[in-house]
């Protein structure tokens, strides 16, 4: 199996869509996983770059994934939109997130600590 260097994750309430690609952008896998399956999958997957759109829950997942050895980057949704190739759906979003995160000039959102998130509420 080819080495996955980046995983784009589209977070949703029930199911997460993953898009795994090599450093060259070749698609290695596309998966749809529940929250529980997602965590188990990521614990077993070798450390790599994981990208998600910045949202309320993405900060929790970013901290969790960083603790198990992944490099996590959050991207503002407005910077992901230009990378959508097809109609908007979870699979296309995950691919666009991976594509956006692979760009050297992309600007990322800092992961918030639980304390900072509490202050915002």
Image: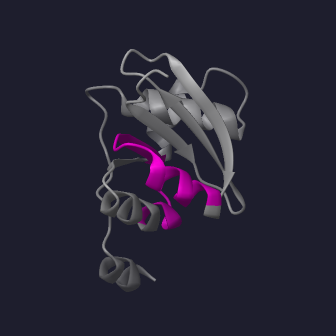
Q: Is residue 52 magenta?
A: yes
Q: Position of residue 87 (x, y in %)?
A: 73, 27
Residue 30, picture quadrant: top right
Identify which residue is drawn at 46% across, 83% down.
Answer: 121
- Asked whether residue 63 appears in the rendered view, the answer is yes
Identify which residue is drawn at 58% across, 55% down.
Answer: 38
**What span is in magenta?**
37-59
Identify which residue is drawn at 32% across, 63% down.
Answer: 67
Q: Position of residue 4 (x, y in %)?
A: 43, 29
- Asked whether residue 53 appears in the rendered view, the answer is no
**In this orientation, which residue lies closer to the viewer: 71 or 118?**
71
Q: Is residue 82 placed above or below 94 in the rendered structure?
A: above
Q: Is residue 83 magenta?
A: no
Residue 48, picture quadrant: top left
Q: Is residue 84 placed above or below 91 in the rendered structure?
A: above
Identify which residue is drawn at 35% across, 84% down.
Answer: 119
- Side of 105 where 9 appears, left or right: right
Q: Give the colour scheme of this rendering.
A: one colour
């Amino acid at each position: 199996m080819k080495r996955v260097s980046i995983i784009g994750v589209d977070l949703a309430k029930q199911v997460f869509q993953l898009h795994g690609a090599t450093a060259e952008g070749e698609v290695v896998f596309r998966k749809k996983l529940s929250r529980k399956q997602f965590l188990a999958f990521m614990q077993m997957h070798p450390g790599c770059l994981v990208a998600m759109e910045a949202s309320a829950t993405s900060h929790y997942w970013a901290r969790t994934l960083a603790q198990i050895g992944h490099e996590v980057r959050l991207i503002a949704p407005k910077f992901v939109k230009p990378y959508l190739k097809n109609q908007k759906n979870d699979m296309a979003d995950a691919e666009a997130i991976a594509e956006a995160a692979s760009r050297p000039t992309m600007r990322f959102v800092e992961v918030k600590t639980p304390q900072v998130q509490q202050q915002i509420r």
